[in-house]
Amino acid sequence: MSYEFNFYDKTNLKSYNLDESMRYQLNMLDRLDVFTRKHCENVASITCRLCEYLHCNKDFTEYCTICAYLHDIGKLFIPSEILQKPGKLTNEEYEIMKTHTTLGYNICMKDLKLRPYAAGPLYHHEALNGSGYPQGLTKKDIPYEGQIIRVADEYDAIVSKRQYKSHVGISDTLKIIIEDTKPNKDTKKSDALFILSENTKLGKNNPIIVRTLFKVVIDDIEYEISCIQSYVEELKNELKRFEQISKYKEKMENSKKEKDKNYYYEGIKMLLKNKETPENYPSIYEEYKNAYETRKAIIDNLYKEIKIIKKLKV
């Protein structure tokens, strides 16, 4: 009776037939640790979906998706004790971690097959307001693919850190991304040049891309609901079977004639499956009821989540 939802099942990129064109790039990812490789795959999937919702053409979508696959390739050269550190990084460690952008760019530039996708590693941590790295670029200098991958990267990083099993509560993740999309309220007044800059009106993320992320997430929540609903329908059918067994059992127990008792007993045995027996079926019946109620509650919460997300403002 176990049911597990895969966040990225619907975003497997089949429509773009990328397998052949990305075989070499994916082989590069095999050299990364499992967590980073999975993150790269997730970011590529989200990036592909964002491009679809942003109505990007097929060639740009494919290009942007491959850039996203490779965005963290520079982490190959980040020491594992920093890359896999469970706690907060020190300032020195963070500075080393930040170099994965230029390291990844250099890896791509030195390889003719990867060179066209060097923008992924280089720009995915740049911010529209100039507060990003490695170059502190502002909106006008950050390629569109970098802006898209940044949003996909931030979303998956938070999702992975929180280890969601469902989209329930995912609106909290989007609220964090919204905060990063707003202008910085803590700008120091002494920084006169920065205050005069147009960049003070910008946050780190492109608001259009963030609003598009909402659509991607809502679409995925609706997909999750449909998956769970299918499972709920299966549970309902099983519950009907158990209800019938219970009715037969009650009639069997109330029958005075042995012939009638045997009739209902045989009916019970015909309805039982696998390792179910007339003795253990009540506990299994209870498990199914609990599973049904749990999934129904998840569906209700997912619908509430959609309502919350639709009210979010960027």
Image (cartoon, rainbow, N blue to C red):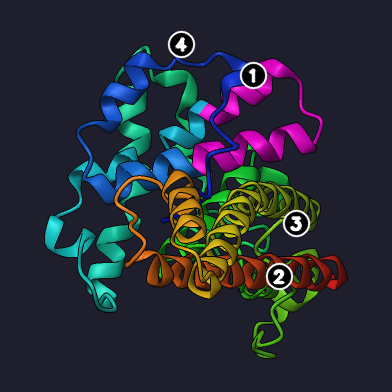
Separation of disc 3 and disc 1 at Cα?
A: 21 Å
As drawn, the label of residue 178 is 2
Tell me which residue sits at (29%, 78%) in the image.
Answer: 88
In the depicted structure, whether residue 290 falls above or below residue 105:
below
- Residue behind mark 4: 21
- Residue behind mark 1: 15
Local secondary structure at mark 3: helix
Q: Which residues lie in the magenta part? A: 43-65
Tell me which residue sits at (51%, 52%) in the image.
Answer: 153
User: What's the amino acid at mark 2?
Assistant: Ile
N-terminal label among 2 and 1:
1
Q: Residues within 10 Å of mark 1 (few under 14, many from 20)?
A: few
Separation of disc 2 and disc 3 at Cα?
A: 10 Å
In the depicted structure, whether residue 114 falls above or below residue 88:
above
Relative to 151, is 272 on the left or the right?
left
For the residue pair 218 and 175, the one nearer the viewer reads as 218
Residue 279: x %, y % from top left: 32, 67
User: What's the amino acid at mark 3?
Assistant: Phe
Separation of disc 3 and disc 4 at Cα?
A: 29 Å
Separation of disc 1 and disc 4 at Cα?
A: 13 Å
N-terminal label among 3 and 1:
1
**Residue 141 in view (yes/no):** yes
N-terminal label among 2 and 3:
2
Q: Nearer the viewer, mark 1 or mark 4?
A: 1
In the rendered image, which quarter contains the N terminus?
bottom left
Local secondary structure at mark 2: helix
For the residue pair 231 and 272, the one nearer the viewer reads as 272
For the residue pair 119 and 262, the one nearer the viewer reads as 262
The prevailing secondary structure element of the residues shown in magenta is helix
In the rendered image, which quarter contains the C terminus?
bottom right
As drawn, the label of residue 214 is 3
